[in-house]
Image: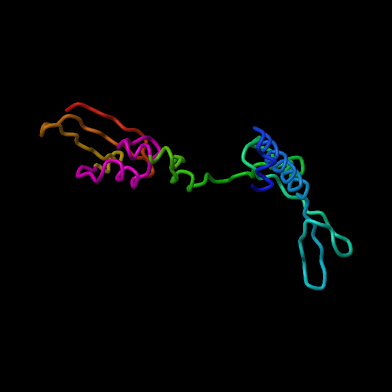
Amino acid sequence: MSAFRKICQPAGICVLLTCVTLLLVGSALAASGTVYRCEGPDGVQFSDQPFGPDPETVIIRDNRVGGSVGDNLPDFDSYPENDPPEQDEPLAAEDETCRFISSTDLRTYLAREQVVPGMTRKQVERAFGRTSEVYPTPQETWVYQTRHYGALYELTYVYFRNGCVERVEYRKP
């Protein structure tokens, strides 16, 4: 019989020895969390123990999951005051961009074959497919037909402004 089995014969002693061993190893690993940087003839080197002339302690940010959202953000007091620049002309690019829809929400809408304001033409085509009815004036409008058992059940009107869905209307024929 091995020596370890002789020690672990009383119930619970083996578990206790395992826990104590893990605790000691874990505390030794936690204590070695400091990193040192030193420049030498071989270039810059990093170590868990100070070495060479003039070792420099490296600060490592905590990147563990959890905690507060603002834990790793820089201090905002160090930034200069940001005054919005004066604009002589409105930006045309702002009118051409659609509102942001998160990828998770977009996937949900597409899976449900649902169109919401702020979608682009391409996203509408992915949700509803191509339409045969497009009316460019007075406002770009795409019309989709929903049929049940061969009969026309519903008409869906998708109104666009600057390439983005402005509103969606569902009407009975």
Task: Find residue 32 and report its horizontal and vertical position in percent.
Answer: 77, 50
Residue at the (43%, 46%) spot, across then down: 96
Q: Which residues are magenta?
A: 108-134
Residue 33 colored in magenta in the image: no
Image coordinates of residue 172 in percent, x first then y, are 19, 26
Is 2 drawn above or below residue 117 in the view shown?
A: below
Q: Is residue 93 left or right of residue 122?
A: right
Which residue is painted at 28% across and 39% down in the image?
141
In the picture as drawn, the residue positioned furthest to the top comes out as: 172
The quarter of the displayed image where residue 41 is located: bottom right
Q: Considering the image in quadrants, where does the C terminus appear?
A: top left
Left or right? Give the position of 149 relative to 142: left
Q: Is residue 150 above or below residue 26?
A: above
**Foreground: 137 or 153?**
153
Question: Residue at 48% of width from left, 48% of height from top?
Answer: 93
Expressed as whole percent of the image width and height from the top left, the position of residue 24 reads 75, 43
In the depicted view, which residue is nearer to us: 8 or 151? 8
Q: Residue furthest left?
A: 150
